[in-house]
Structure formats: C-alpha cells, structure tokens
Image (cartoon, rainbow, N blue to C red):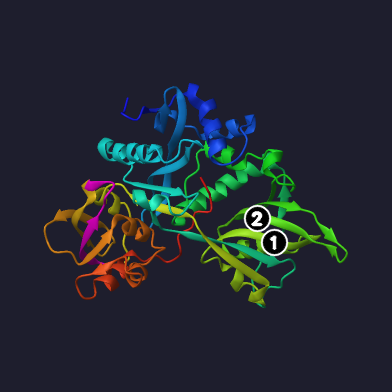
Amino acid sequence: MSDDGLTLRTLTTDDLPAFAELLAGAFLTDPTDGLKHREELVFEPDRTHGVFDGEELIGTGELLTRKITVPGAGQTPLAAVTSVGVAPGHRRRGALTRVMRAQLHGLHEDGGEPIAALWASEAVIYPRFGYGLAAQFFRAKVHAKAEFRPGVELEAERVREVRREQAIPLIKAIYEKEAPLRVGALDRPESTWEFLLDDPEYRRHGATALKFAVLPDGYAIYRVKNDWNEEGPRGTLTVQELVANTPETYATLYRYLLDYDLIFTVEAFAALDEPLIHLLANPRKMTRSAGDSLWFRIVDVDRGLVTRRYNAPVDLVFGVHDAFCPWNTGNWRLVTDEGGNAEVTRVTDAPDLELDVIDLGAIFLGGTRPSTLAAAGRIKERSAGAVSRATAAFATDREPSCLESF
C-alpha cells in the first residue's frame, strides 16, 4: 500500500459490477444492468487496472487487444485504451496517473504492443501522458433529397433493407474486406461486433432500433427519428456506419439514405476526406463540424516506428523528449528504403528534428503533417529541409479514419 492509502492491481471478473458502477458515475449516468452487460462484452480483466482506496474501486483503465490498420503495412497489434474513469470525490489524487503509468510502463517492460490509442473524453487530459492528436472526423448534416451532380455512377442493383439477423454476416464480410485497406480502422472480434450493435432502447434517444441497408459491396447502419411541424415532416436519419468497397456502392447507399421518405436531415460521422460533398450538385447542402478521434501514443520509439511503411526514402535523426516514458528520450535515427520499410536505432548524432513524443504520435498515421506541427512551433527543424523530408515520408494517400469509438 502506498503512503496515500491507494493501491493498484489488475481486476478479476468479480470486479465487473464495481467496474461498471464506477464508469457510470465517472461519465455522469446511472448504473444499469444494460451498462454492465455492454462492459462485460469486451471486458478484459487481466488487462484492466484498478486503483483502490481500501476496498473501494476509485479509478480504472482498460487495454483492449485489437489491431489497427497502419500506413502500408495493414493491421498491426494495438493497445486500445478504454474505460478510463475516476470516481467523483476521488479526483486529483493521482489515480489516473497510476493507471496510465501501469499501462504504458507495463507494455514496455513486457514487450507488449508498441503503439497505443484512445478516444479522449476531454482533449486536455491525455497529452500529459504522451498521446498526440492523430486523426479527426466531422459531423455532417445533409439536406434530404439533395441532388447529386450529373454523371455520378450508381449501382444497377437496388439497396435491400434486411433484418438484423440477416444483415450481420453480410456486413461483417464487407467490413473485413475494407478495414485492412483504411488507415485507422480497427479489426473487430466477435465481442466487438456485439458491443457495437448492442441496441437497448435507452441508447436510442427516441429514435428507432438500428436499421440495415445492404448491397453486395457495402452497407449502411442507421436510425430514423420522426418529427413534424406545421410545414410537414422534419425527420432525422442518423448514419451510425457506412462502409463501401467501391465508389458506385458508396454513392448508391447515400442516394438511398438521402431519398428516405419523411426525412428532412441526414446526419453522419465522417472521415475528413469523406467524398460525399463531391457527389452533391450543391455542396452547400452539406454542413460540417469537426472533432478529434484517435489520440496516438508511441510506447517504444524503436519498436513503434517500424510497424508502418513510409511514403519516401528518408534518413533523419529525431530528438525525442518523453517525460512520462523516459526510455524514449534521446536521439533516434529513422532510415527507410525504397519499399517504405524502416530501421530505427538510438544514436548520438545531432538531431535533424526535435519534438515531443506527443508529436511523434500525432504524425504516425499521416493525418497530422510534420509541416503543420512545425508551423505551430511544436517541431523544431535543426537541419535545413528536414521538415519537408519528414512530411513526405509520413504522408498517406487518404486521411486516417476511425469512426468506431471505443
């Protein structure tokens, strides 16, 4: 036991009720059997740390065993950080810091996943622990019946509405084909599918149960909510997920959703480079508001940077500062070949670039450019042209996209 009376240990299945109750309180909701059931679906107790004050669980954080698609290399192991919470009345006691240290130091000491990522409840929290903003998304609102520009190609086959039990095997196959191709997308074990498609009434906020629209090469999962005023129907259709393996399928699914009867607005979470706006005859029929999605952490610089491929040959020395994981502090040479494969070694050479591990995490997926961080004063160029070379090497064809909040 520490001097402040707090202890830390991994949880067991017996701790699940207290774990679910703690998270309910931390995220301003009431504990319910439904919430406990959702947490149980993906609960990995041996990868979940709990901070205790005596017998009371006051803080927690979990690592999910997942894979993420990284540039050029497909799916690679990821420590997906989730269920981080501290009980009201016990904040500012260091519980979160203990959990973060146990997670990151444990991954380093055990040779676990060399990269970690999370969605942040508050954006100011996780840079303290070395997480950088690596991917973003936007909320799109599109006027129903918005016309496409001339020449948009659609599938000849009609979109089918199918029941949940019929849809699930179809959408799994489509997602498993697309996810390895999209940087930022996660793999989905069976338990994750159950978690994502868990659909109790309290989560619907007055809308319908999830609906499923499918084509051979794509699907849309969505809800509708009716509304009316003196001018007529003002319903909302909210897209939970739309995945398409071809441009024609993508356009056909959105055409179907936009033409839905009694709907006034179609809302969707979308990638920053979502092509929908370029299908519209009038782009102003769609409005967007941006938000942050993945926050990324390099656990070990040498092991982490070699998991992806690079867009251009480069030989650069990065001077890295890492206050929370000091083994990363120092100068690291990144050398890539024509095929994008990388070798990373610790060196004593003077750095070409100086940056915090936060910024290294931010640029890892290609969504945040080194040139952008240099313009913000976060990356310091010590050798002429180093920022441009790094920007070219870390570049990706498309923006990273992780629309699955975990």
Residue hosting label 2 = 239
- The amino acid beneath tag 1 is Val
User: Which part of the image, by quadrant, shows the N terminus?
Assistant: top left
Please name the residue shown 55% across and 58% down the image.
245
Q: CA distance from mark 1 to mark 2?
A: 7 Å
Callout 1: SS: strand
Task: Decide whether residue 314 is among the magenta residues.
Answer: yes
Where residue 227 sits: x, y (%)?
Answer: 81, 56
Please name the residue shown 63% across and 29% down the image.
33
Callout 2: SS: strand
The magenta segment: 312-326
Where residue 179 sits: x, y (%)?
Answer: 49, 52
> Observer-nearest residue: 401 or 352?
352
Looking at the image, residue 321 sits to the left or right of residue 161; the answer is: left
> Pointer 2: residues within 10 angstroms few (<14), some, or many (20+)?
many
Please name the residue shown 28% across and 67% down the image.
390
- The amino acid beneath tag 2 is Val
